[in-house]
Image: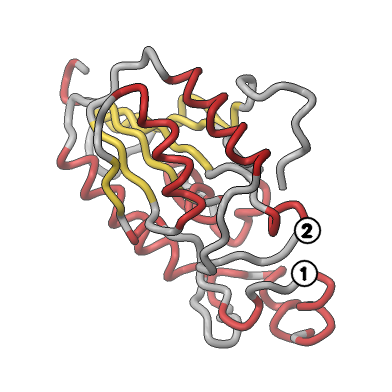
Amino acid sequence: MANNICRVYLVRHGVTEWNQTMRYQGQTDVPLCDFGREQAARLAQRLATLEVDAFYTSDLVRAAETAAVVAAPHGLPVRPEPAFREMNFGRWEGLTSAQVRERFADVYRAWLEKPLGVRPPDGETYAEVADRTRRGLAELVGRHGGQRIVVVAHGGAIRCLIGTALGMDLNLFWKLRTDNASLSILEYPEAGNGILLLFNDVSHLPANLPPAT
């Protein structure tokens, strides 16, 4: 790309069984289900003719599987980047929202109100997620000036990156919907100054696939 602009194609991984049952996944390694693999294949078709210079992914299996499918038509390697992992939800992982609300009522209530500073038991805060994802993307933007890169990540990580680009209070990150296998695009004319070009686009997914969560 001209003028040293880095364009970042942000992809959320395809759906998993835990997405379908509304369970906190966090950093638990849950693979894609069949529908998730189909979603990844549809996105790969959409991006097959795009000129891409590099592919990156969270090192969690659901993101890595998605990235491998999307990168295959381009013949490029996929580089794992732990900075783009989902939030570590600690002891909440594997539980539904109803179960978390019942077992961790006070912490869960605080998390819903102001998640930036709240740490699920044995987990991390959303502020820590925001810090590592920002630093991770800044490094890639600095490395890929004038290029296009694809980053496959998770709902929480993508909300951090887009919310930061928009100057949002990240306590309000739930106002940003990020569907499974969605595509968003950020452009960086200079490091740290992101511009949102596309958000949560799922036009490549057929209507008969199940709704993403």
Task: Determine if residue 189 is in view.
Answer: no
Inter-mark Cα distance, 1 to 2: 8 Å
Q: Is residue 204 above or below residue 100?
A: above
Q: Is residue 94 left or right of residue 168?
A: right
Q: Residue at x 44, y 34 (%)?
A: 69
Check disc 2 and give the amino acid type: Thr
Image coordinates of residue 135 in percent, x first then y, are 28, 57
Image coordinates of residue 172 in percent, x first then y, are 63, 56
Image coordinates of residue 24 in percent, x first then y, are 66, 66
Residue 75 - label: none
Q: Residue furthest front?
A: 34
Q: Is residue 85 above or below residue 102?
A: above
Q: Residues within 10 Å of mark 2 (few under 14, many from 20)?
A: few
**Circles 1 and 2 in contact, beta carbons < 8 Å:** yes
Numbered disc in front, either 1 or 2: 2
Q: Residue at x 35, y 29 (%)?
A: 187
| Quadrant for the N terminus in the image | top left
Task: Determine if residue 56 is in view.
Answer: yes
Residue 96 - label: 1
Q: Nearer the viewer, residue 71 or 200?
A: 71
Q: Residue at x 25, y 31 (%)?
A: 76
Question: Which residue, given by chain and number where applicable, does mark 2 sit on?
Answer: 21
Q: Residue furthest top?
A: 49
